[in-house]
Amino acid sequence: MLRFLDRRALRSLLLLGCTEWLLLAAMLYLAMRLRFPGDPASLAESFRHPSLQALLFGTLLTLGMAAMGMYQPHMRETLSGRMARLAVGMGLGVLGLTVIYYLLPQMHIGRGILAIAVALGFLAVLLLRSLFQRLLDGETLRRRVLVLGAGKSAALIPQLLRRRSDRRGFALVGHVAVADEICAVPQGDLIDLHGTLHDYAAREQIDEILVAVEDRRGRLPMEALFRCRQQGVAVTDMASFFESESGQVPLALTDPSWLVFSGGFLATPARRASKRALDLASALLVLLLTWPFMLLVVLAIVIESGPGQPVLYWQERVGQHGKVFRLVKFRSMRTDAESDGRARWAGKNDSRVTRVGRVIRKVRLDELPQLWNVLRGEMSFIGPRPERPDFVRELAAHIRYYDARHCVKPGLTGWAQLLYPYGASEHDAAQKLKYDLFYIKNQNMVLDLLILLQTVEVVLFGRGAR
């Protein structure tokens, strides 16, 4: 179930999240002591369940931070950006606490102590984040990776992992060329082993060997690699390495045999039942929370377009196993947007979008009627976004493995929506497919909950909307 946590960056962030959770709980304890110094009687009277109250405080604020994307492995931000995310995330946590205090009055904390605890927590988390960032940028916690190969495949590494944030989890020691291989990496990156591969790995404390040899037949030093494995050194192929480090399936490095033998794609009866339960619970909860906004959207569309004009927009989309279904949305474009019958991508500042449509697209309110598709079982809450049949036929003809995204139900939100902006071209569709395949391959309940939580950030900041 936690297979996707094989990604080293995610394990580090999980450790960071647990540390911050405990740190925030400790800050509430500290706020209690500051509020009632030397007065244990008043402290006991005000806090009847201090341990539970502290853990609840830490949990809600940590969830708020997660909702703001503060546990994404490849986040790049300035100090001011980190402070802004932290402030909004803690604000969401306090909002959640307010609801819980209303439902469970015995867990209530006074406003003064809550304000002190939030202020202390803000400073403590900011300091911890700065220390964590320094550790990630240093060499201490990075895995030492030796690349076996110096040809064209090996030369792809700086192209596919070009950002500094992409390399926080590892440090490339260098490249070892194999026999008869045309060198495509800089000469300065080549390493002379001065002995055997396993001796070098032990001497230089190599944690992982990345096999980047184009033609492996008869070229791989299998005995030496086996000796390295016995020494505890991981041996990884290019596709698995990039999947682990980037959170996407690299299409340029992927062949059918790797997809068949690499694991994942689990669709057990228990997984299907748990996913359906999450779909129903999420759809009903969102419907309960957003029905007033839906009524306002209906009213705004009627006022702008006039009585008699359609409020909802029905459109054919391709679902699981290629089955076509009718997706429903609030109408955000003019009624003559596709009067010629041709399907078109929505462009930036699209002139077909109405004034109301521009607003509801920005905050994703136009997607809310799709809760009906989720309740009917045509869509899931988490999954690849469904595309129109015309686009699917065109994209499947040009993009390898595109049809693989239809082995699961399409979703309201997904892994690609978190990590890639709005797609409106064949190139964008190919890039998003890498993330969709990663989700399909590694799907589980924990990953679904993480995506669901971080979708809050997408909605609040309107990322990827057009």
Image (cartoon, rainbow, N blue to C red):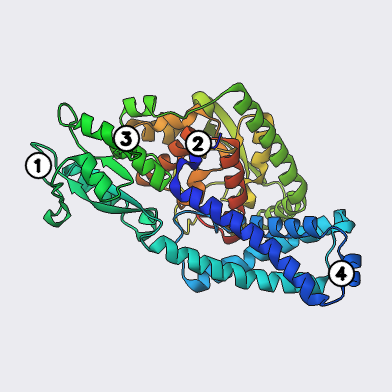
Q: Secondary structure at mark 4?
A: helix
In terms of sequence position, does the residue under pointer 2 or pointer 1 come before the other?
2
Q: Amino acid at mark 1?
A: Ile
Which residue matches tag 2? 3
Coordinates of residue 334 in the picture (x, y in percent): 56, 50
Q: Quadrant of the N terminus?
A: top right
Question: Viewer-proximal residue, 201 or 391?
Answer: 201
Q: Is residue 136 visible?
A: yes
Which residue matches tag 4? 43
Which residue matches tag 1? 182
Nearer to us of marks 4 and 1 is: 4
Q: Amino acid at mark 3?
A: Arg
Residue 91 lies left or right of residue 10; in this view the side is: right
**Residue lying furthest top in this view?**
269
In terms of sequence position, does the residue under pointer 4 or pointer 2 come before the other?
2
Distance CA(mark 4)–CA(mark 3): 57 Å
* Proximity of marks 1 and 3: CB atoms separated by less than 8 Å: no
Distance CA(mark 3)–CA(mark 2): 21 Å
Q: Amino acid at mark 4?
A: Leu
Q: Amino acid at mark 2?
A: Arg
Q: Residue at x 37, y 34 (%)?
A: 394
Crowd around label 3: few <14 · some 14–19 · many ≥20 (10 Å):
some
Q: Decide: is 44 above or below 36.
A: above
In terms of sequence position, does the residue under pointer 3 or pointer 2 come before the other?
2
Which residue matches tag 3? 229
Distance CA(mark 2)–CA(mark 1): 36 Å
Crowd around label 2: few <14 · some 14–19 · many ≥20 (10 Å):
few
Question: Viewer-proximal residue, 206 or 439?
Answer: 206
Q: Residue 60: which quarter of the image?
A: bottom right
Q: Secondary structure at mark 2?
A: helix
Q: Secondary structure at mark 3?
A: helix
